[in-house]
């Protein structure tokens, strides 16, 4: 298994994994184990990989992408209404007494692990590699998890120690806002 920052050579593999577990295309049997909701245009995914240097991938021994984690500046994410809402409410969230801002934090996610590799520890490895890749730019990471995705909430709070900073409603869904420091713990 190789865990590395993605390049455009990984574009199709990332997209394939993303589509398999996206809420618009996921199979009914896979849905209870979680889904991703962000839609990317081809240009948005390219910008995330190239300009933001924001996609961490895991490749199995055949080179197939079996996990990814995305991360980028709030300015990048401000193309989506959900993230505009989060930016407007960042001042309501704190980590260790520090109030989140667009400058001291960034947004991680979506993240996804192929079902063959869930429960193996790969999630935590990819998560930590993504965190390390952003640590020189920001002290705080923030993300959101839909409250109807209990597996993702369990993974992020129990496996990698994220803290629940609050909850918020958006577009008829209820979300957790989770935060953590980027410095190695
Ligand atoms: C979310 C995801 C990345 C987590 O990776 P993972 O390898 O499944 O995570 P882990 O198995 O290490 O941890 C998940 C924990 O949740 C538990 N869990 C599984 N199903 C659960 C459920 N329905 N409700 C609550 N907890 C659940 C697991 O048992 C495990 O805890 P345990 O090891 O203490 O038993 C992965 O499941 C995934 O890619 N899901 C589809 C896409 C997705 O939801 N992405 C996140 C969007 S925010």
Image (spheres, rainbow, N blue to C red):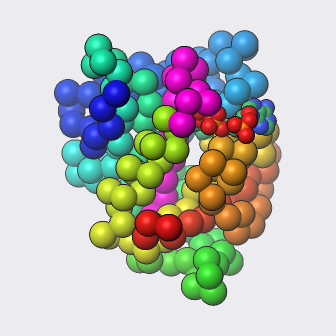
Could you tell whether 70 is left or right of 176 in the image? left
Tell me which residue sits at (39%, 71%) in the image: 138
Tell me which residue sits at (67%, 64%) in the image: 163
Magenta segment includes 115: yes
Residue 157 visible? The answer is yes
In this view, the residue in front, 167 or 44, is: 167
Magenta segment includes 163: no
Tell me which residue sits at (29%, 14%) in the image: 62
Could you tell whether 159 is left or right of 151 in the image? left
Question: From what the image shows, is residue 93 above or below residue 141?
Answer: below
Residue 11 rendering spot, x and y as whole percentages: 29, 28
Quadrant containing ligand 1:
top right
Q: Which quadrant does the N terminus fall into?
A: top left
Question: From what the image shows, is residue 20 above or below residue 2?
Answer: above
Residue 92 rendering spot, x and y as whole percentages: 68, 77
Range of residues picked out in magenta: 106-121
Tell me which residue sits at (56%, 30%) in the image: 120
């Amino acid at each position: 298994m190789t865990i590395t920052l993605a390049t455009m050579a990984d574009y199709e593999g990332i997209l394939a994994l993303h589509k398999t577990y996206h809420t618009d295309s996921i199979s009914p049997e896979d849905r209870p184990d979680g889904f991703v909701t962000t839609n990317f245009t081809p240009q948005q995914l390219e910008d995330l990989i190239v300009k933001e240097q924001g996609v961490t991938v895991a490749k199995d021994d055949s080179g197939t992408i079996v996990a990814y984690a995305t991360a980028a500046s709030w300015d990048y994410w401000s193309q989506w209404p959900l993230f505009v809402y989060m930016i407007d409410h960042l001042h309501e969230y704190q980590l260790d007494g520090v109030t989140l801002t667009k400058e001291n934090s960034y947004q991680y996610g979506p993240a996804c692990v192929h079902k063959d590799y869930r429960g193996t520890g790969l999630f935590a490895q990819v998560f930590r590699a993504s965190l390390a890749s952003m640590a020189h730019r920001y002290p705080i990471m923030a993300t959101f998890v839909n409250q109807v995705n209990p597996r993702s909430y369990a993974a992020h709070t129990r496996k990698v120690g994220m803290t629940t900073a609050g909850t918020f409603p958006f577009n008829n869904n209820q979300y957790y806002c989770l935060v953590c420091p980027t410095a190695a713990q």
